[in-house]
Image (tube, grey):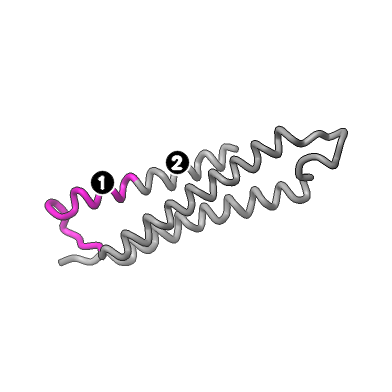
Amino acid sequence: MFALKTLITLNSGAFVVLLTFIGNAAANSAFVVPLDALRFAMLCFLIGIATTFVVVAISYVNSITFNPYDLGKGMSDKVAIPVYIIGAVIALVAFVWGVARVVLSVTSP
């Protein structure tokens, strides 16, 4: 759960930083970032946030429905843990890809 909270913080923080950068970049920045790179990075961060929220929702529903005495309810650990890990990896890759796209597209005027 700590990793999921961290991923939400990373992706949402990066999204807010990009919005702030867009607001201040036109007047005060010595660097130029193409708009398509910013748009792509924001989409990556939104995908990371959405994926993390879906994994949190799945884990919440699974924790409510899972009963160790009745294995027919909820997801078993063989299914649940890979779902959690894959969702977290997708969110992390979305964050890294968005940051890399912005950093690699920065140019000076």
Q: Residues within 10 Å of mark 1 (few under 14, many from 20)?
A: few
Coordinates of residue 35 in the picture (x, y in percent): 26, 63
The residue under label 1 is: 20
Q: How far is mark 2 from mark 1, CA to CA?
A: 16 Å
Q: Amino acid at mark 2?
A: Thr
Q: Residue at x 70, y 39 (%)?
A: 62
Q: What SS does tag 1 mark?
A: helix
Q: Amino acid at mark 1?
A: Thr
Q: Residue at x 40, y 57 (%)?
A: 43
91 up-or-down from 105: above or below = above
In reply to whether residue 25 is colored magenta, the answer given is yes
Q: Quadrant of residue 103?
A: bottom left
Magenta residues?
16-33
Q: Which mark is residue 7?
A: none
Q: What SS does tag 2 mark?
A: helix
67 up-or-down from 22: above or below = above
Position of residue 80 in the picture relative to residue 42 (left or right)? right
Q: Residues within 10 Å of mark 2 (few under 14, many from 20)?
A: few
The residue under label 2 is: 9
Q: What predominant SS class does the magenta segment belong to?
A: helix
Q: Residue at x 39, y 61 (%)?
A: 100
Coordinates of residue 72 in the picture (x, y in percent): 84, 42
Position of residue 63 in the picture relative to residue 43 (left or right)? right
Coordinates of residue 53 in the picture (x, y in percent): 54, 43
